[in-house]
């Protein structure tokens, strides 16, 4: 039933998204021509005429003209992404929806049905409701400043302490049809976003936070806390708020066409707020906006991550992964090794290795030599 909650959205998206399994190899498009595809160079194969052999009355017939040697096949596409299979991990790595890297180097991966997994570089460990999780559909994962692992599920938020999960359940009116987001401040404050608004964990209780009295309860589609302590929350179809020191600021979204929905938020060191939406990437900086029409990547964006080299990695629904820099956008799909082109979460380690949680499993990226 959990996956059916997203069925209506997926059906609409399916009608607009091209199948990824037959997508083009990784390619680079210029930044200012992101919407103009580059045509592949057509290879002209010369026509070979085989002469007609006329029968003659001789003792030995002439040798037939040999058939032309076929052209050598094109070199196979170079694989950039490497899949970590369930057989490799010996845990059910499928239908993955969340991902994060812990300060100790451990990789945490959440699935839609099988709980959460931890990989320490040597072995995998699976946690489920049998270990205290509030549910086996793990939507978000975050690490608190003290190293505590927190997750959100359909029914609550859970933290791992001494090998056991402790859960804080949502009220009956809070659960919605969208996956629940999670953000942790530098002081350890826990914020949870879900189908009926924003929650703040205080003294082991989840308390609702109203950002707009006139709007009423709204679904939280994006949530983050900056190092400065500022809380960003995307509510409903067209609302973005910034909260700091008790003051709430509403950010105008007039640059976004009607129907655009914010899906994820990511801050950068230069003050940029990267905003992933159902219609591409938007950049908010110094009170102004840049849009996909300015050359930013388009597509249905599900996740964002910044690499040490400054590249912005973009996960999409049905269109693979994109790597964006000022020089252009590089696109990776199934032919580049991704197990699936619906990418729900991304994480980048300190060495620049990129991990992707997809509907088909887990993959990591390594640039070709």
Image: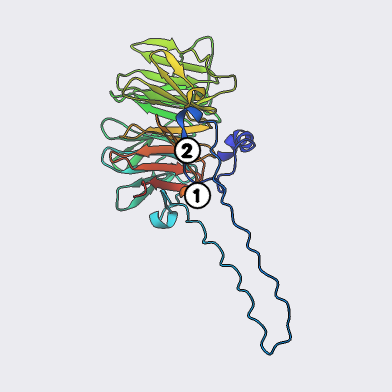
Which residue, given by chain and number where applicable, does mark 1 sit on?
Answer: 335
* Foreground residue among 306 and 123: 306
On residue 63, which mark appears? none
Q: Residues within 10 Å of mark 1 (few under 14, many from 20)?
A: many
When the figure is inspected, residue 337 is found, relative to residue 2, above or below; the finding is below
Point out the tag, 1 or 2, that comes first from the N-terminus: 1
Establish if 39 lies above or below 85.
Answer: above
Residue at image point 60% right, 40% down: 18
The percent coordinates of residue 102 (x first, y second) are 30, 38
- x, y percentage for residue 252? 49, 12
**Residue located at (30% from left, 22% from top):** 227
Q: Quadrant of the N terminus?
A: top right
Res. 344 mark: 2
Taking the spot 56% from the left edge, 67% from the top edge, the residue there is 69
Q: Position of residue 170 (x, y in %)?
A: 47, 28
Q: CA distance from mark 1 to mark 2?
A: 18 Å
Q: How many neighbours does mark 2 have within 10 angstroms: few (below 14), some (14-19), or many (20 or more)?
A: many
């Amino acid at each position: 039933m959990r996956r059916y909650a997203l069925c209506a959205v997926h059906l609409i998206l399916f009608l607009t998204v091209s199948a990824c399994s037959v997508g083009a190899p990784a390619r680079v498009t210029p930044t200012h021509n992101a919407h103009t595809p580059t045509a592949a160079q057509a290879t002209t194969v010369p026509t070979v005429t085989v002469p007609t052999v006329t029968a003659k009355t001789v003792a030995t017939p002439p040798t037939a003209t040999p058939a032309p040697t076929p052209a050598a096949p094109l070199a196979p596409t170079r694989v950039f992404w490497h899949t970590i299979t369930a057989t490799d991990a010996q845990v059910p790595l499928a239908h993955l929806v969340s991902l994060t890297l812990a300060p100790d180097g451990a990789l945490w991966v959440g699935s839609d049905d099988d709980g959460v997994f931890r990989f320490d570089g040597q072995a995998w460990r699976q946690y489920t409701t049998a270990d205290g999780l509030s549910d086996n559909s793990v939507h978000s994962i975050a690490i608190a400043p003290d190293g505590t692992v927190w997750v959100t599920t359909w029914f609550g938020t859970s933290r791992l302490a001494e090998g056991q999960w402790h859960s804080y359940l949502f009220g009956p009116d809070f659960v919605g049809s969208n996956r629940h987001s999670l953000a942790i401040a530098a002081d350890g404050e826990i914020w949870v976003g879900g189908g009926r608004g924003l929650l703040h964990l205080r003294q082991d209780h989840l308390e609702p936070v109203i950002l707009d009295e006139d709007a009423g309860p709204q679904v939280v589609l994006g949530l983050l806390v900056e190092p400065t302590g500022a809380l960003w929350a995307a509510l409903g179809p067209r609302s973005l708020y910034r909260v700091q020191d008790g003051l709430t600021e509403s950010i105008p979204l007039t640059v976004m066409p009607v129907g655009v929905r914010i899906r994820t938020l990511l801050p950068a060191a230069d003050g940029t707020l990267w905003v992933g939406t159902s219609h591409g990437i938007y950049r908010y900086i110094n009170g102004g906006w840049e849009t996909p029409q300015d050359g930013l990547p388009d597509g249905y964006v599900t996740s964002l991550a910044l690499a040490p080299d400054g590249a912005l990695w973009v996960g999409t629904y049905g269109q693979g992964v994109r790597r964006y820099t000022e020089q252009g956008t590089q696109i990776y799909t199934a032919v580049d090794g991704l197990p699936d082109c619906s990418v729900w979460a991304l994480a980048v380690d300190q060495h620049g290795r990129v991990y992707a949680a997809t509907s088909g499993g887990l993959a990591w990226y390594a640039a070709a030599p």
